[in-house]
Amino acid sequence: MPAINTQKKESAFWDKQKETISVADLKSLQIAKLRESVRFVAKHSGLYKQRKKLLEHNASFNSLDEFSKKIPFTTKEDLLQSELYENLCVPKKNLVEMHSSSGTSAKPVYSFLTKQDIQKSSEYLARTWYMQGVREESLFAMMASYGLFSAGLLNHYAIQQIKSFIIPVGGSSALKTLGILREFSVDSCAAVASYYPYLIAMAKQNNIRLSDLRLRHIIAGGEPFSENQRCYVEKELNAKMYDQYGLCEINTGIAGECAEKNGLHILADYVYPEIVHPASGEVLGENQEGELVLTTFYKQASPLLRYRTGDITSISYASCPCGRTMPRISRIKRRTTDTLFYKGINIEKPYIAKLIEGLQGYLNPYIWQIELNSDAGRDEAVLKIVLEQGERENALDHITAYLQRSLDFKIKTRIFTADELARLGNSKLKNFLDNRNN
Amino acid sequence: MPAINTQKKESAFWDKQKETISVADLKSLQIAKLRESVRFVAKHSGLYKQRKKLLEHNASFNSLDEFSKKIPFTTKEDLLQSELYENLCVPKKNLVEMHSSSGTSAKPVYSFLTKQDIQKSSEYLARTWYMQGVREESLFAMMASYGLFSAGLLNHYAIQQIKSFIIPVGGSSALKTLGILREFSVDSCAAVASYYPYLIAMAKQNNIRLSDLRLRHIIAGGEPFSENQRCYVEKELNAKMYDQYGLCEINTGIAGECAEKNGLHILADYVYPEIVHPASGEVLGENQEGELVLTTFYKQASPLLRYRTGDITSISYASCPCGRTMPRISRIKRRTTDTLFYKGINIEKPYIAKLIEGLQGYLNPYIWQIELNSDAGRDEAVLKIVLEQGERENALDHITAYLQRSLDFKIKTRIFTADELARLGNSKLKNFLDNRNN
């Protein structure tokens, strides 16, 4: 029945023409859009005014290489040091919304939006959600916080394009959320990645049967998570879990895994992705690991040129069995800032996460935090954990001994309930918390 | 300069034609829309299926009186006892969003929306916000929770119609909220009424100068508040505070005060308001106090006929100096459920609120809660309060003595900080909390 097959294949795409554009056509489009962005920013942005001449002079590049060579980076530091509206490229009265980074820095970074910015965002982001299984007939629970966190409202608008039934769960409690997932037979949902282990822990603690849920497509964003964590969540919730990537300064949901789960298709006709060496800034080739750098095509209010995301990944233009030609970035394993410096030692988050996964059975390997404190001039490290249900507190001896075998520094271990440790609800639980006075 | 005056007057209305409709035309429109609603519900709603014949038979009423006489009430109890989709009047696939009452009852009431329901909601609700001072050039902070609480998203959509710059503050902390109000010179904002005294208390506690804020239009909804509370908030924030009324089952923002602050103009071409005697159900005349009953005109998914809101008010069709002909309901002072039954005594919320206002100077009269507990078969009442800054704990003696003079029952008093008592953030602080086993 070829007719049915064709139809099936068609319905796998939100916008087949754009999603299967040839790489050559994509690159032409990128050059054209990049020129527009550079000219627009040079003309309107106060943030770039010192580079105005440079940008104007270099806005007629003829290749992507030339763009990378001639246009300087923008860093988060640039944004943090700028005035409130310094990068604003439209009259203030054209603004209709704003979002703010959840950042660890005291000063948040704001992203402003015009009505057209929101329309373009919704139009492109819908593609990511559709690719990850969200359909008109889906019953979708948005479990990310709404409000200033861009992943709530901006993804909500995108899914409205698909006309799904959206349940805006937002910051509801875990028990209320579990009740809604069950009562409405929700089939698709989104949350920050660490929310799923928390939700599972809360269900078990309250004797709520996860087998009563009907989830099929679980979307996780906002923070890196391991393949082990994915396997755990997929098994417990009996659903497929897809990674999604975005950041407030550029936009939420700009890349996501397709059903192949082999890299995240990035909306390369909405933003221009480059991978650069984190130290030298040199542009790296396909499949080489480095820092993701993004340039916006469709942000009138807060455009950014060659923005250093701080996220470490690689990019591939190889064809994907799903049929999409949009390049794929590998899953973000760490950020350039994912390191604590403690008593002369670099503590890398992926290393700690791996180590803690080795304690599975004793503790919940996906809900933890290392806190560094300085008390009367002496620094100390504390690992906060959640014991597996049924585990007695004497599991602590095993855990402590295991950690001391593997770590070059002393660390205290403290036991919490899942609720205590993740009581911030849908917010991200920071794995590294540095309270030392610097 | 009559030309300028005319222009000014024009811009006071969002939709002058609809807002200044003659009362006679309004009543004709209401009859036509009510007939449509009755027929639609009779045809599509499972909730009303036992009354289907009755509704069909009576759908051709010729007057509003006849409508009231022939169509039975719908109660919250009806909704609580119904199946999940029992009142759903459209195919499930047409749903795009839902909201849930924050209700005190264990089981929440859901309101479902089609795309058209949202469009109609935004179109009509925009009128309330515009009337209360929100303009295209406004910098508006939405400080109600987003998510399942309908006041967040549905008002957000309405204000999008006005094209204001919306800062979706949502559930941000009080300190973050104060920072944003100041940094962006926010001129208009909305929150549940009790959030304002909390925000003021937090500013004072943290030495944040309220005179640095630039608020002009403060909109408060979600719960009754006294004129004293309004005066206090207006003085502290140097802005005008307007009351707004709505409920999840019908819609948020369906009535609001104009600049006259003399009753809330209700969107009587979007819902049909009646006032009935709470006990007999008899329809009451203008200016007589009774329970507000509402029928929806533009809810496809979850329509309601003669819904008993439980809110006590009166209605007036008298002309308003603002020029609007939409009838005004008086400010809600209490709900039919605003009474605690304790040791044979009826405790009325307005009475307690008034009593506590008499303690101004000693305590914050707008942040309090009475909790009833039963411990080993013995009931006890606890009043939780926040002392005024600088007040020593021995103010407690005065407070206790004052309360015992005025109350017919024993009550313990406990002192909290504003943050502890209102730590639920933007959620409503329930003044009455009944934890007794029934």
Image (cartoon, coloured by chain):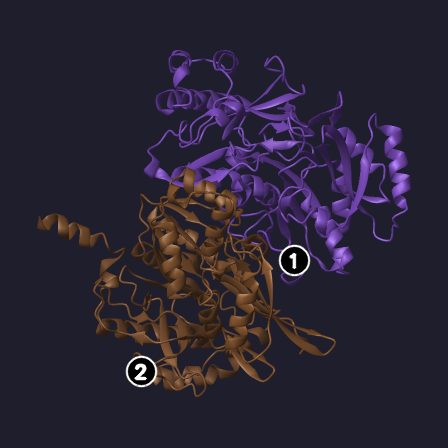
Chain colours: A brown, B purple
Circle 1 residue: B181
- Left/right placement of residue B194 relative to residue B228 reads left
Chain containing mark 2: A
The answer to which of A297 and B436 lies nearer the viewer is: B436
Against B420, is B298 above or below?
above
Spatial CA distance of label 2 from label 1 is 45 Å
Circle 2 residue: A285
Q: For residue B359, what is the image quadrant?
A: top right
Residue B364's tag is none
The answer to which of B90 and A332 lies nearer the viewer is: A332
Q: Position of residue A129 (x, y in %)?
A: 34, 55
Q: For residue B402, what is the image quadrant?
A: top right
| Quadrant for the C terminus of chain A in the image | bottom right
Helix, strand or loop at mark 2: loop
Q: Position of residue B88 (x, y in %)?
A: 39, 30
The answer to which of B435 and B355 lies nearer the viewer is: B435
- Mark 2 belongs to which amino acid? Gly
- Left/right placement of residue A79 relative to residue A64 reads right
Q: Position of residue A93 (x, y in %)?
A: 54, 59
Q: Is residue A387 visible?
A: yes
The answer to which of B346 and B41 lies nearer the viewer is: B346
Between circles 2 and 1, the one closer to the viewer is 2
Could you tell me which residue is drawn at 51 percent across and 47 percent down? A205
Q: Is residue B119 visible?
A: no
For disc 2, the neighbor class at 10 Å (few under 14, some 14 to 19, many from 20) is some
**Residue sitting farthest toward the bottom:** A280
Disc 2 + disc 1, Cβ < 8 Å: no
Chain containing mark 1: B
Helix, strand or loop at mark 1: helix
Against B36, is B111 above or below?
below
